[in-house]
Image (spheres, rainbow, N blue to C red):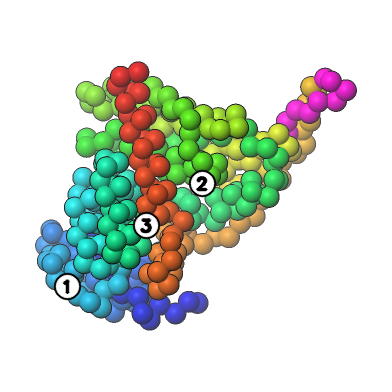
Amino acid sequence: MMNYANVKIAVIGSGRWGINHVRTAQQLLGDAGVVVCDADEKARQKVAAVSPGILFTTDLASVLSDASITGVIVATPAETHYAVAKRCLESGKHVLAEKPITLHAEEAKDLIAIAERCGRQLMVGHVLLFHPAIVKLKAMVSEGFIGKLQYIYSNRLNLGTIRSEENILWSFAPHDISVIQYLTETDPIRVEATGAAFLQKNIEDTTLTMLEYPGNIHAHIYVSWLHPFKEQRLVIIGDKGMIVFEDSAKIEKLKFYPKGFERIEGTLQKFEGDYEVVPFDAAPPLVEEHKHFYASVMNNTRPITDGAHALSVLEILELAQRRLHHG
């Protein structure tokens, strides 16, 4: 167990997802290592339910002026990320901002520049990159387990919760874009997107985003909150095999399929065998994300989901959004 004695974290925002950060920080750091700041005084009771020993405040300025606080987790509404993260960085705090890093690429670039100028680390909460199954999948792809990477597709489908401040693309797709960027280690050369709004005007309930990467690597992302059942499935296809990660499955979440086509004496022939279940650690992704952030705070080292990674995801989202509305 790593010693986090020199780490003290402030969680700003304790809403639906923020309270998970509070629980995780308290689990790893104890009451003395966590401060929670929320503008809503009513949140005090919810935080006390996690642990009555956690310090709660509604005053952000007091958090920023506290020299004992080494890092800050920004879990406020997305439209406030830029302003809050900027204040935290300029106060000398390392920052983990929830996704999306900001709502505009120019703001993200500004945060990256501020972090560099202040010598602080800027990390973004693309939590799937810390899922042990994704870590295992990445290693398999990097080691050539499935041969040359050809195609990736992701389905993230469910019924609700409906958002009025963002469409399904911005709500669900950042997870999948971040994973695809992580696997390809490059930026797409073409982005296309289509979608439809049924429940609220101009707020898409379902979208399909197509990405083309160098080396003839293609991907598509299908997301919907208007779907009869929950599905979280990622399929990675190479010329020597295929990997399927189905996070919504109860068992056998990660599987390898020795399937594909090979050319024998000039003719394409199919090869296929029974799938193999791939074991992976059971560590909770959010716990692993926190540990990674704490290590960045302690050692002032660049996290894998740094500002540059978050900016690439944001720029793809912006381009896909433009394709949705303008073709």
Residue that appears at 44% across and 39% down:
177
Magenta segment includes 48? no
- Assign a secondary structure to mark 1: loop
Q: Identity of the amino acid at label 2? A: Tyr
Which x, y percent locates residue 306?
40, 54
Nearer to the camera, 172 or 157: 172
Q: Mark 3 to mark 2: distance in Å?
A: 15 Å
- Quick check: can you spot residue 125? no
How far across and how far down the image is residue 286, in percent? 42, 59
Residue at numbered disc 3? 123
Seen as rendered, the residue at the extreme front is: 117
Instruction: Please say whether residue 149 is visible from this viewpoint.
Output: yes
Q: CA distance from mark 3 to mark 1?
A: 21 Å
Magenta range:
259-267
Relative vertical location of residue 37 with respect to residue 214 in this rendering, above or below: below
The majority secondary structure of the magenta stretch comes to strand
Tag 3: amino acid: Met
Quarter of the rendering containing residue 18: bottom left
Residue lying at 60% horizontally and 38% vertically, measured from the top left: 236
> In the structure shown, which secondary structural element does the residue marked by tag 3 occupy?
strand
Secondary structure type for disc 2: helix
Whichever of callouts 3 and 2 sits on the residue coming sooner in the sequence is 3
Question: Which mark sits nearer the N-terminus, 1 or 2?
Answer: 1
Q: Is 133 rendered above or below residue 248? A: below
Q: Position of residue 243 (x, y in %)?
A: 64, 41
Q: Residue 127's mark? A: none
Q: Position of residue 209 (x, y in %)?
A: 43, 28
48 vs 195, nearest the viewer: 195
Mark 1 touching mark 2, by CB under 8 A?
no
From the image, tell me which residue sits under label 1.
65
What residue does disc 2 label?
A: 182
